[in-house]
Amino acid sequence: MAVPSEAAGGPLRLGVLGCAGFARRRMLPAMAAHPGVRIRAVASRSAQRAAATAAPFGARPVTGYRELLADPALDAVYLPLPAALHAHWVEAALSAGKHVLAEKPLTTDPEQTRALLARARSLGLVLHENTLFVHHGQHAVVRRLLAEGAIGELRALHAAFTVPALAPGDIRYAPDLGGGCLADIGLYPVRAAVHLLGTGLEVVGAVLSSAAGQRVETSGAALLRRADGVTAQLTFGMEHAYRSRYELWGSEGRITVDRAFTPAADHRPGLLVERADGIETLTLPAEDQAAAALTAFADSVRDGKDGAGNEADLLAQADLLARIRHTAGLGAVA
């Protein structure tokens, strides 16, 4: 196992396992700008692709994923591979003694997720799923407002995340790579329900549909319920006009969060709080949620804590995704 440079006060030395578009567009620039991490190496099965991705960040290109994992100078790896490959390569990275930041979903099966979290814990390693929005401060403000009774007693959550149809050939249309809108798009409102309502949610109903000619689900909806009767109505899909919003309905008002899941780094959130006596907009500072997620990961490595990385929420999310699929008639129950 590498000796973590972060533990000695230096930046976390990262290797990148794969050259996905999201990694190149969003995460690698955030890593390059972050004082707590350094991109040391980028691996691809293609030498040319590794070189092209690594060059702008001054990183070493590596041909082959196992070659990168064998590098003792790396503390951790970021893994932006297709979802169906996550379980194998997360296990390989942990076995190589690396802390892991893996793109969401961590795996496509709740039991695999449990096993990997347990494996990380047993090795004293940090394993985080890179679900960015939960690290944005606007949601902490929302939770504080709920706790303070700003809208009375909570009654319901309505959350939606939808995007337009993807380009033909996008991996999210490939079932063998873990494609489909539930794990890629539906994960966001599902995680919002867990983040805001807690882990004790059951699936009351769910629908998953496929657009003509597609082999994966491209739209869906789910109804969840908490033991006290609070409900969560979730809508998601990848054949829609863009929408990224949730609303919390209470006995005395409502909180609306627009651009809830993928705000730009320069976006200043405006939380809308509606009550009988009027409407208030709380304008918050801009935040880069990718930078916040990287900070949380690096801090966990440095402090030697949180080897599971919000384990309870992550496991609740994994179970709910599996149960939504089962309730919609597309899979076995977890």
Image (spheres, helix red, strand yellow):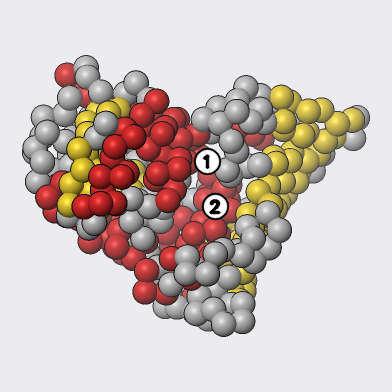
Residue designated by label 2: 188
The residue that appears at 51% across and 30% down in the rendered structure is 288
Residue at 11% across, 29% down: 3
Q: Which residue is under mark 1?
A: 133
Between the C-alphas of marks 2 and 1, the distance is 8 Å
Q: Secondary structure at mark 1?
A: helix
Q: Are marks 2 and 1 in contact (CB under 8 Å)?
A: yes
Residue situated in front as seen by the camera: 175 or 280: 175
Q: Which mark is residue 295?
A: none
Q: What x and y, as percent, mark residue 37?
A: 30, 28
Q: Quadrant of the N terminus?
A: top left
Q: Position of residue 190 (x, y in %)?
A: 55, 55
Is 154 positioned to the left or the right of 217 in the image? right
Q: Is residue 296 above or below residue 18?
A: above
Image quarter hosting the C terminus: bottom left
Label tally: 2
Residue 181 appears in the rendering: yes
Crowd around label 1: few <14 · some 14–19 · many ≥20 (10 Å): many
**Is residue 219 rendered to the left or right of residue 11?**
right
Depth check, front residue: 210 or 29 = 29
Residue 173: percent from left, percent from top:
48, 70
The mark nearer the N terminus, 2 or 1, is: 1
Residue 272 in percent (x, y) is at: 77, 34
Give the vertical position of 111 relative to 174 (above or below): above
Residue farthest top in this picture: 9
- Asked if residue 133 is positioned above or below residue 80 in the image, the reply reads above
Image-quadrant location for residue 125: top left
Residue 117 vs residue 232: left or right?
Answer: left
Q: Amino acid at mark 1?
A: Phe
Q: Residue at x 37, y 61 (%)?
A: 83
